Amino acid sequence: MEISWKTLTWILSLIMASSEFYSDHRLSYSSQEEFLTYLEHYQLTIPIRVDQNGAFLSFTVKNDKHSRRRRSMDLLDPQQAVSKLFFKLSAYGKHFHLNLTLNTNFVSKHFTVEYWGKDGPQWKHDFLDNCHYTGYLQDQHSTTKVALSNCVGLHGIIATEDEEYFIEPLKNTTEDSKHFSYENGHPHVIYKKSTLQQQHIYDHSHCGVSDLTGSGKPWWLNKTSSFPSLPPINDTHIHHRKRRSVSTERFVETLVVADKMMVGYHGRKDIEHYILSVMNIVRLPNFIVTPV
């Protein structure tokens, strides 16, 4: 059964102790640098903005329309949000021509971001940057899926028939965007999902919260674990239900919490963009998420 899921409300609680927080630059750059050491292989690429036919337009790929708005506003301002974008990039001997459409149904008008400290809530807002897109590779609509955010550069996933590619801005050259020149392009890191080391996933994906069992494996891989036994089915008491529609829209109210470690990894100014970029990926139809 294919079910269309639509997010009703997100509340991103960013938990941090500001007095113990280091500079955004150090944490963001060093964390990405450390993460890259765990990858078996990755490449650097410089994406460019192009038109529908692939003709070059600009090296600027980050959102520059200042389209931050309140979610309570139902209508998009066409002067602020770019509804259609095209990008090109090359990696692993392939050329990718991205056809992207603004994700206008990304979150509900009740979307809220809350910042919490040691003493409870510090402040909150209901603003959202219109920089989250979904789409496909040009001329490959039925066989590819793309979910990218260009809030601070291209951040997301490109899924083809034979591989899934993650892409993100290279932090050391984009951390201070006000002093970065786009004349020669905006370097990005791209790597294959298949090259992620399993040991890295198990050891570094839980952000201080352990899901490991005594065997040192995640609980879902523990052979000794089992589901509660169910009572035997009595055929005489089975009630046949009428088949419902095979396509039903559901609404999911989602609470996403970023702890101090996660904020430290990505930097306070980028954490909201990062979380929403991940959720934009999760909303891809039939996409199976792997912790990284």
Image: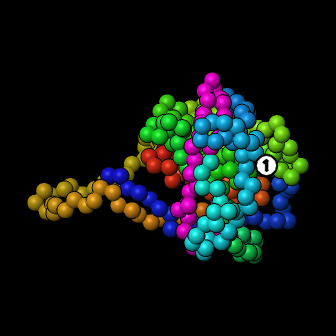
Figure label count? 1
Label 1's element?
helix
Q: Residue placed at 72% from the left, 69% from the top?
A: 115
Q: Quadrant of residue 240?
A: bottom left
- Looking at the picture, tell me which residue is in the foreground, 23 or 214: 23
Can you give x and y, in whole percent of width and height, for residue 268 in the image? 77, 59
Residue 12 spot, x, y in % from top left: 64, 65
Q: Look at label 1 and name its amino acid.
A: Ser
Residue assigned mark 1: 28
For this orientation, the residue located farthest to the right is: 179
**Image quadrant assignment for residue 4:** bottom left
The magenta span reads: 86-114
Q: How is the image coloured?
A: rainbow
The percent coordinates of residue 60 (x first, y second) are 75, 45
Figure check: 174 above or below 163:
below
> Is 50 drawn above or below residue 3 in the view shown?
above
Whether residue 177 sits left or right of residue 208 in the image: it is right
> Residue at horizontal 50%, vertical 63%?
7
Q: Is residue 126 in sight in this rendering?
A: yes
Residue extending furthest toward the top = 93
Q: Quarter of the image containing the C terminus?
A: top right
